[in-house]
Image (spheres, rainbow, N blue to C red):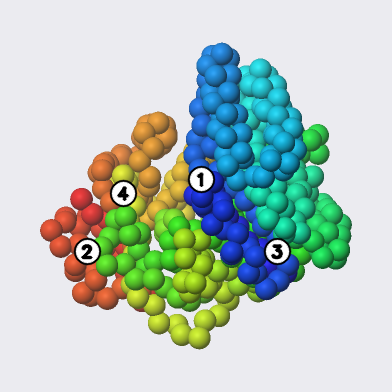
Amino acid sequence: MQVYKFGGASIESPERMKALLPIIAEAKDQLIIVVSAKGKTTNLLENIVQEACNNNKQKASDLLKALEEDHLDFASKVLKHSFFEQTKLELNEYFSELQWAVDDADAARFDYSYDQIVCMGELLSTKIFCAYVQSEGLNFEWIDSRDIIRTDDTYRDAKVDWTYTQNQAQEAIGKLLKEGKNVVLQGFIGSTSDNASVTLGREGSDYSAAMMAAMLQASSVTIWKDVEGLKNADPKLFNDTIKVEAITYHEVIEMAYYGAQVIHPKTIKPLQNNNIPLYVKCFLDKDLKGTVIQNEVSSIFYPPLIILKKNQVLLQVTTRDFSFITEDNLSNLYSIFHKLKIKINLIQNAAISFVACIDNKEELIKQLISLLEKDFKVFSNDDVSLLTIRHYTAETLFNLTKGRHTLLEQKTRETVQVVLK
């Protein structure tokens, strides 16, 4: 059995959804397909949340009506008449549920309201998707992920109850697989023990796919994207990027840690722990080789892997009385960053100073500096960039830093990080 994950871009139009049929039909094994909300649906649902929680209920309902018309029009273009009529009835139930969630939305419990509304994007898209593959003669069953994935009530970033979820997955999905059926379910969503809908946070759909693979012992996971595979740098920021054909989970974790928008660590963990390979392939051309991520690769040679984080702030914190930055001071500093949940992207300390490069989130920066200034002097460089190169060469480092002012540089055998102005 394999797990396929299709993101919003792959089903953003009826034509794109139809173009996925050969990918699905030609799979050599049974499939569990995890599907995201189509296109920009999540953005529209987020707008609905904002309007509803701001007590602009009529505006929220108008936006909901537009979303309803869009999904029904989409369904009518991919489904045969009999399938469309049945699917329309099922979609209407979710539109009613959405309206109830809008009416109930409250700024005082924004995160809860967010999840009750935003989760509907995946439910709508998978209803249409499953009806489409069924109408084309493929043996698929639709499952509501909220019946499988049990979480706590940390809305918008829910933590999964792994034991309960695994039991549910093996019982409900495992039963269908044993009957020779394939399965479609939603990424990104689950539910609490009180049956409130939740979302799983950043890259939640990829995480859903990884969970199902680990819990049901899949042979592989394939994430279908609109790119040919993983690149050694973001092609939107750098020219002449190189596709990486094979890479280890360890290397991808390192890239993610330094800020690369690749595969989220929470997705990697269950796959790495269960030795399940992850493929990144292009839904626009299924015959392209793509990239495989696994525990071991036959070659350990990589091109320079480049990560650039813009809009950074470089803070220098010094003691007021020239006392050393010792364990006590470091403990105090770390506790302040931890209290505000601020991730340090680069850190360096000397005798009486502590330097940290962090994301420039204005309100958090103000709070941070206010807390730090109680015991320390604080200096900052705003609007800097943090360049990280794994497997760097002198030539690559020179080419990417020439003409820029280097504020700080750190090197290890494998990695160089440079703060640039």
Spatial separation of the CA atoms under disc 2 and disc 4? 14 Å
**Can the viewer see residue 15?**
yes
Spatial separation of the CA atoms under disc 3 and disc 2? 43 Å
- Dot 4 or dot 3: first in sequence order is 3
Task: Residue at 64% x, 27% y: name it.
Answer: 113
Q: Residues within 10 Å of mark 4 (few under 14, many from 20)?
A: some
Q: Position of residue 129 (x, y in %)?
A: 65, 48
Which residue in the rendered view is the most extreme toward the left?
403
Q: Residues within 10 Å of mark 3 (few under 14, many from 20)?
A: many
Residue 400 is tagged as 2
- Dot 3 or dot 1: first in sequence order is 1
Secondary structure state at the residue bearing disc 4:
strand
Left-right relation of 215 to 206: right
**Can the viewer see residue 52?**
no
- Dot 2 or dot 4: first in sequence order is 4
Residue 13 is tagged as 1
Spatial separation of the CA atoms under disc 1 and disc 4? 32 Å
